[in-house]
Image (tube, rainbow, N blue to C red):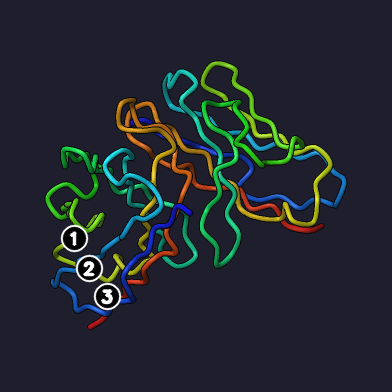
Amino acid sequence: QVQLVQSGAEVKKPGASVKISCKASGYTFTTYYIHWVRQAPGQGLEWMGIINPSGGTTTYAQKFQGRITMTRDTSTSTVYMELSSLRLEDTAVYSCARDRVTTVANPDALDIWGRGTMVTVSS
Amino acid sequence: DIQMTQSPSSLSASVGDRVIITCRASQSISSNLNWYQEKPGKAPKLLIHAASSLESGVPSRFSGSRSGTDFTLTINSLQPEDFATYYCQQSYTDFAFGPGTKVDIK
């Protein structure tokens, strides 16, 4: 079955960077977009960006421009999201999610989600 | 940036009630609007895409509609498993979510 398996929880100090992985299985990795979404404790969902695993092209939410980098490794069917210059308010659960349409079309909606990775930023 | 608002921010309802949640976009997003259901400790679940297309396996008591830049999610005959938080999301430019509507038990 289609699965997205994320890396484990992280604790970071302010100013540091975090890199989270999202390993896809059960489908052809390069044929579906992957999104990243975060949710701070008690808060709503926040879309961070999207990567096309086929060519590696990315689009980031304006809020994260300059601090976020999404990459992929097609040999391991893994997408990575790195967030730098971490602040206390970056404490959140970070989730990857697959788009419902293939990369031959424009991305559409998020239908398969990973279980999330808790990132805690604390001094 | 396109801003998404939702109303109400929360509501209390009883099993069997009809619930309507509204999402408004600050400018035209065509029908590029999705609805998700989120329960504590679980990943969000896509209910509806393209404003009114029900995802496979989602009960037919859920429906979505559009009128201009206003979108509604309707739950007919609310069931115990429907108590959750619901988010709209536009996919016209980026994929910004609305702030969410929490549906709890009256």
Q: Residues within 10 Å of mark 3 (few under 14, many from 20)?
A: many
Q: Identify the amino acid type marked 3.
A: Val
For the residue labelled by badge 1, is the local secondary structure a helix, a strand or a loop? strand
> Is residue B68 shown above or below B84?
above
> Is residue A48 shown above or below B54?
below
Q: Identify the amino acid type marked 2.
A: Arg
x and y, in percent, of residue B5 in the image:
50, 37
The disc label shown at residue A87, or none: 2
Q: Nearer the viewer, residue A56 or A1?
A: A1
Left or right of A61? Residue A41 is right
Q: Which residue is mark 1?
A: A82
Q: Write the residue at 43% across / 19% down.
A: B28
Q: Identify the amino acid type marked 1.
A: Glu
x and y, in percent, of residue A43 in the image:
47, 60
Mark 3 or mark 2: name the one nearer the start of the chain: 2
The chain carrying label 2 is: A
Q: CA distance from mark 3 to mark 1?
A: 14 Å
Quadrant location, the C terminus of chain B: bottom right
> Is residue B11 shown above or below B94?
below
Q: Which residue is mark 3?
A: A121
